[in-house]
Image: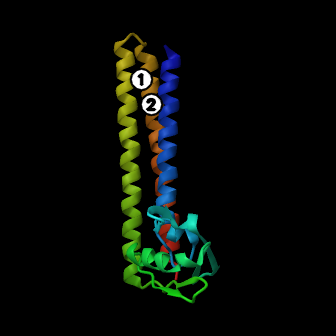
Amino acid sequence: MTEEINFVLDSTKESMSNSLTHLDKQFLNIRAGKATPAMLGGVFVDYYGSQTALSQVANIAAPDARTLTVTPWEKSMITPIEKAILIANLGLNPMNNGEAIIINIPALTEERRRDLVKQAKSEAEDSKIAVRNIRKDANSEIKKLEKNGTSEDICKGAEDDVQKLTDLHIKKIEELLAVKEAEIMKV
């Protein structure tokens, strides 16, 4: 019976870790004033009739902290890429020089920084909710195992382990948020 409990604990830990990974990816999309190629991660270009990630049709580089360059593999893709960046509504203004697209990243205003912090807090809260839902599901599985004959002591211990995992992952989420918040508010 304990291998079933171990399976529940292992899958719970893995799911909670996946929530942290997802939060990391979401935080990459929230820019903190410094240009990174990840800022264009959600941009898709119409490439011969199909929506394709920008990174699949162009090289994205950050030559300095305030500039991104997008160099398409095919020169004919410059205009569609420029349109896709504008359509993505990232608040960026692409400039086409015939060879590549240059994007100057504007300095963040205090108000914009606060908005980005709110966005980061919202993402962190979503991750906390996900972790708590994973805890709820794990505890439900443990209750089912208890009804099916697993000893009450083993199940109680497993529930305590699930709570410890939950507390640990919530703490990690708060730490990630604090780092991101400091990064956003740094002028």
Count of numbered badges drawn on the protein: 2
**Residue at 50%, 70% in the rendered image:** 40
Q: What residue type is disc 2 on?
A: Asp
Residue 51 lies, with reference to residue 35, above or below; the image says: above
Q: Residue furthest right?
A: 63
Which element is circle 1 on? helix
How far across and how far down the image is residue 165, in percent?
Answer: 49, 39
Q: Give the left or right position of residue 75, taking residue 89 as reference.
A: right
Q: Residue furthest top?
A: 149
How far across and how far down the image is residue 147, in percent?
Answer: 34, 14
**Residue at 46%, 24% in the rendered image:** 157
Q: Is residue 6 visible?
A: yes
Number of residues whose C-alpha sits closer than 10 Å to that of mark 1, classed few (under 14), some (14–19) or many (20 or more): some
**Residue at 48%, 80% in the rendered image:** 79
Q: Is residue 175 visible?
A: no
Write down the quadrant of residue 151 in the picture. Answer: top left
How far across and how far down the image is residue 145, in percent?
Answer: 39, 17
Which mark is on residue 164?
A: none
Number of residues whose C-alpha sits closer than 10 Å to that of mark 2, classed few (under 14), some (14–19) or many (20 or more): few
Q: What residue type is disc 1 on?
A: Lys
Q: Give the left or right position of residue 85, taking residue 98 as reference.
A: left
Which element is circle 2 on? helix
Evaluate if marks 2 and 1 touch, with contact meaning CB atoms under 8 Å apart: yes
Residue 27 lies, with reference to residue 73, above or below; the image says: above
Which mark is on residue 156?
A: 1
Mark 2 vs mark 1, CA separation in Å: 6 Å
**Residue at 51%, 37% in the rendered image:** 13
Nearer to me, 43 or 27:
43
Which residue in the structure is indicated by mark 2? Answer: 160
How far across and how far down the image is residue 178, in percent?
Answer: 49, 64
Nearer to me, 69 or 50:
50
Nearer to me, 8 or 67:
67
